[in-house]
Amino acid sequence: MSSAAPAIRTRITSLFGCKYPIVLPGMSWISDPTLVAAVSNAGGVGILATGPLNENETRDAINVIRSRTNKPFGIGATLLMPGATENAKVAIEEQVPILNISLGKGDWIAERVHDYGGKVLSTVTNARHAQSALESGADALMLTGHEAAAHGGDVTSLVLIPCISKRFPEVPLVAAGGFADGRGLAAAISLGADAVAMGSRFAITQESGLAQRVKEIVSNSDIDGGSTESDTLYGKHFDGIPARVLKSDESLRLNSKRASLPLVISRAFAAARKMNIPLYKVIPGLLTQFDKMYIIAQFGAATESLMKATVDGNVEEGVQFIGQSQGLIGDIPTVEELIQRIVFDAVECSKLSYDTFSPGEQ
């Protein structure tokens, strides 16, 4: 490509101050400072995953990102999980431009972020979640469809995007789940979105921290022996929340049945010890908020399996989050190459659509 792809103007690019409506979502052990800065420098918006980080590590990561780019970026905070509130407070202290929050009430975050001119992007999976997020002060919504890696909702992006766009027409939307190329970007905008998030696609780039072996497995698009759109598994027993992962013997085993009550209690106590939470505080939670404690216990237990695959490349003993868009992935480009390709292809696809629907001789 001899020249850079043209800038695309949407409500998201205007809100976040980026060149292209393409977002890197926060993915644990993958969306690190290197990948975040690469995406932001290439014209998109990178979001740092803070799930594996403590407060000091989050602050250090923010400083590293700022040393590598002067473009807008964000941090992610899954508020249900231990440590997320503390990491969000660090991001606010550091005046990070964008906070992407999920699984929790973020009104206090929105108030403090808006004080310094930052923006809040709330991740949701349905209209009720969207309404609650907006009432809590969200500036934009990330809509996670059923196709997505990890914790996508029950509704596919094809239906979710126009439903939320129709119900909340004034709200900028980022579509996530099933997007990995220019055709997807053009389609998402046609459906009512203002940008796309491409987690699985950005995970399979040269700058990504994902284990090289997993990159090679996912980018092998052969029908026989490769990774196709059908080679994922969506289940509710792996980490406590319905999640999509790479299909393997191990992921099938871990999703086969719900953990027993004694095992959940044991995992809850183990998680409490790791977080230095007194056990007497855990017992009331098990009695009054078992579903929430179940999620936390299972999520903590899943961490080891996730790290085996994501960090070590061991998919025989570990489990890898991946979306159905892996069927669209066939190479391991640089982030810059990928974003330029996506934008050029989206522009061409939009031109073809315009020609198709333009009046004239058939």
Image (tube, helix red, strand yellow):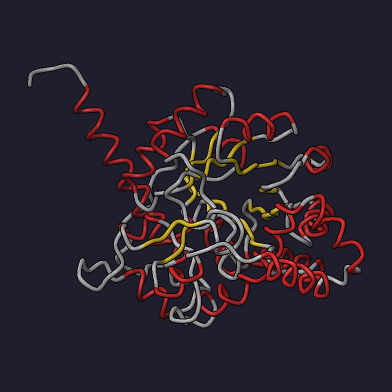
- Counting from the top left corner in percent of width and height, residue 74 is at 66, 53
Q: As displayed, is residue 167 above or below residue 301?
A: above
Which quarter of the figure has residue 347?
Answer: top left
From the viewer's side, name the closer residue of 247 and 130. 247
Which quarter of the figure has residue 295?
Answer: bottom right
Image-based side of 65 in relation to 287, left or right: left
Q: Would residue 117 be visible to someone looking at this image?
A: yes
Image-based side of 95 in relation to 276, left or right: left
Tell me which residue sits at (62%, 53%) in the image. Answer: 71
The quadrant of the image that shows the N terminus is: bottom left
- Counting from the top left corner in percent of width and height, residue 243 is at 52, 56
Image-based side of 69 in relation to 269, left or right: left
Q: Would residue 98 be visible to someone looking at this image?
A: no
Tell me which residue sits at (41%, 34%) in the image. Answer: 189
Q: As displayed, is residue 151 above or below residue 319?
A: above
- Counting from the top left corner in percent of width and height, residue 198 is at 46, 53
Task: Residue lying at the far left in this picture: please name it.
Answer: 362
- Counting from the top left corner in percent of width and height, residue 7 is at 44, 42
